[in-house]
Image (cartoon, helix red, strand yellow):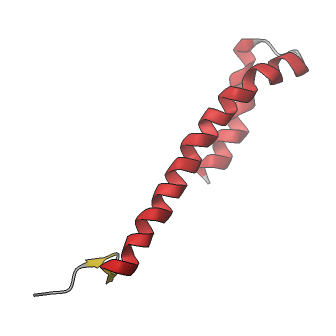
Amino acid sequence: MAEARVFGLPAEKGRWGFVGLGFVANVCMGAVYAFSVFRKPLEAAWGIPPSQVGQLGYPFMAFLAV
């Protein structure tokens, strides 16, 4: 019977790739949540109306895409 492989590595070592992928996915989801937490303080500190706060998130979203 053939040895089980994950990402081209033996299963015992290849499984760590899933841990890394899970970490990256959670960081991305957490970053979106973090922006929503800081949105109100940014509005208050800079006096920006809620309709323009979305523009604050554009650089943030671009950074996440990279």
Locate residue 41 relative to residue 61 in the image: left or right: right
Which residue is at the front of the view, 26 or 56? 26
Give the quadrant of residue 56: top right
Tell me which residue sits at (72%, 40%) in the image. 59
* Residue at the front extreme of this rendering: 12
**Residue 42 x %, y %:** 82, 24
Which residue is at the front of the view, 5 or 59? 5
**Residue 55 x %, y %:** 72, 27
* Residue at the left extreme of this rendering: 1
Which residue is at the front of the view, 47 or 14? 14
Quadrant of image for the C terminus: bottom right
Tell me which residue sits at (53%, 48%) in the image. 26
Tell me which residue sits at (62%, 47%) in the image. 64
Tell me which residue sits at (41%, 64%) in the image. 18
Quadrant of image for the N terminus: bottom left
Give the quadrant of residue 16: bottom left
Residue 6 drawn above or below residue 22:
below
Locate residue 43 relative to residue 22 in the image: left or right: right
Give the quadrant of residue 57: top right
**Residue 47 x %, y %:** 88, 15
Locate residue 12 relative to residue 28 in the image: left or right: left
